[in-house]
Amino acid sequence: MKLAIRNGRVVDPASGHDAVVDLYIDGSRIAALGAAPDGFVAEREVDARGRVVAPGMIDLCARLREPGTDGALKTEMRAALAGGVTGVVCPPDTDPPLDEPGLVRMLRQRSREAEGARLYPLGALTAGLRGEALEQIETLAEVGCVAFMHTGCLPRDHGVLLSAMRYAKTFDLPLWLRPVDATLAGKGVAAAGPVAGRLGLPSIPPQAETVALHTIFELQRATGARVHLCRLSSAEGVELVRQAKREGLPVTADVAILHVHLTDVDIGYFDSRFRLDPPLRSQRDRDALRAGLADGTLDAICSDHAPLGDEEKLLPFDEAAPGATGLETLLPLLLKWASETGTPLVTALAKVTSAAARVLREDTGRIAPGAKADLTIFDPVQPWRVEPEALASHGKNTPYQGYELQGRAVHTLVGGDLRK
C-alpha cells in the first residue's frame, strides 16, 4: 500500500531530525520525507496534525508467555501495538525454555500469524537455563535467535560462562547477561537498606550486581566477547559500566523504565505491585540510573514486561511473582522521564528506537528513505488512566494502576502495514 502521513512532527533520533513534514510509505519501506516521490499517489492518507511520528519502539525485554500458554503471544502482541512497540525481544525463560531450534521456529511462526510487532527471540545460553551445559548457540542463531541469554543470574560455574564467551566470540554472537551473583542475591526480594529492614524483607545487596559485573568484565578482557547487560539497578553498577566503556570493552546496557521512576520507598506496606526483579533501590540509585542514561552509560530503556495474573501477584510480598505489565505504559513513562529531567524528545526516543536497534544490530529504529516502515504515531499529551480494563495485555498488574499518564499511541505501523 502507498500511504501518506501528513502534518506530523517527524522525530528521527538516528539523524536528529525533528520537524513537521509529510512522510510517504511505499509498501514496506519509507519512500520519502517532505516532498512526495515522482508519480506517488497515496492509496490512504493519515492526518497526524498535533501528533509525533517516530520510529516504532523496540522493547529489549518483553515476556510473551509462549511457549507455555497457547494463544498468549497474540494477546501480548496486541498490547505491543497498542503501546506503539514494533519490535519485541523475547527472553528465553519460557516454558519450556527456548533451547531447541523447533521451539524457536514455532514461536516465530506464531508471531507471524499474530501479525503483531516484529519478534526478536533470545536463545537459552545453557540447556534448560540450568547454567551447566552450553547450548548449540550457533544452531539457534541459524533459526532466528538474535542473541543468547542466561536469565535470572550468572551461571554459578564461571567456567561455563568463560566457555560461553569464547564460543560466542568465535562465531561473533552476542551474549545478554543479567549482572546478578546468585550467592549474594540469595532469596532476597527487596533492595538492602532501611526499607527492607523496616519491613523485615530478605534483601539483595548492591554487591550482588557489582560482583557479577566484575566477573563479566574480567572474562570479557580474556575473550573479547560482546555482552549486553540487562536491567542495571544500582549506582555502583552504573559506575562500573561507565569505567568498562571508557576502557573500551564491547559492552552495552539497559535499564527498565520502572527503575527510572520508582524507588524502594514506593513499596509502602508490602505492595506486591512493586515486587520487581531487580528490586527497586534507593533514590540515590534511581538518580544514578538517570545520570547513566543522560551520559550514554546506559544505552537503552526497556519495559521488562511481565504479564502476570492476579493469582501470581495477590500474595504476600515475598511470595508474589516479580514483575509488572509494561508494554502499554512504556511510552507515557518515557515521556514522563523526559519531562522531569528536561531531556529533549529526540534524545528520549533514541533510548527505545535507534539505540535499541544498535544493541540488536538490526536495520530498524530510524526514519529515512529506504528504511523499514516501522513507525508509531502518538499524541504526546493525551491523558489516559491506567486501569486493568484499559490494558490489552493479559497482565493487568502495574505500579501505575489508577494513575493518569500522558501520551498514547494512535497508530502503529509494522512494515508499512497499519496494524493499529
Image (cartoon, grey):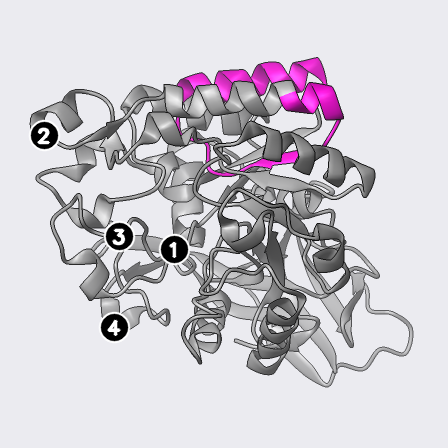
Between disc 4 and disc 2, the foreground one is 2
**Mark 4: secondary structure:** helix
Image vertical order of residue 247 relative to residue 299, above or below:
above
Q: Earlier in the sequence, mark 4 or mark 2?
A: 2
Q: Earlier in the sequence, mark 4 or mark 1?
A: 1
Q: How far, Cα to Cα, is label 4 from label 2?
A: 34 Å
**Mark 3: secondary structure:** loop
The residue tagged 3 is 321
Between disc 4 and disc 1, the foreground one is 1
The residue tagged 1 is 326
Q: Earlier in the sequence, mark 4 or mark 3?
A: 3
Over which residues does the magenta segment extend? Answer: 219-248
The residue tagged 4 is 389
Q: Nearer the viewer, residue 41 or 162?
A: 162
Q: How far, Cα to Cα, is label 4 from label 1?
A: 15 Å
Residue at (74%, 42%) from the top-left corner?
A: 15
| Whole-percent x, y for residue 172 in the image | 79, 41
Between disc 4 and disc 3, the foreground one is 3
| Whole-percent x, y for residue 137 in the image | 70, 51
Q: How far, Cα to Cα, is label 2 from label 3?
A: 18 Å
The type of residue carrying mark 3 is Ala
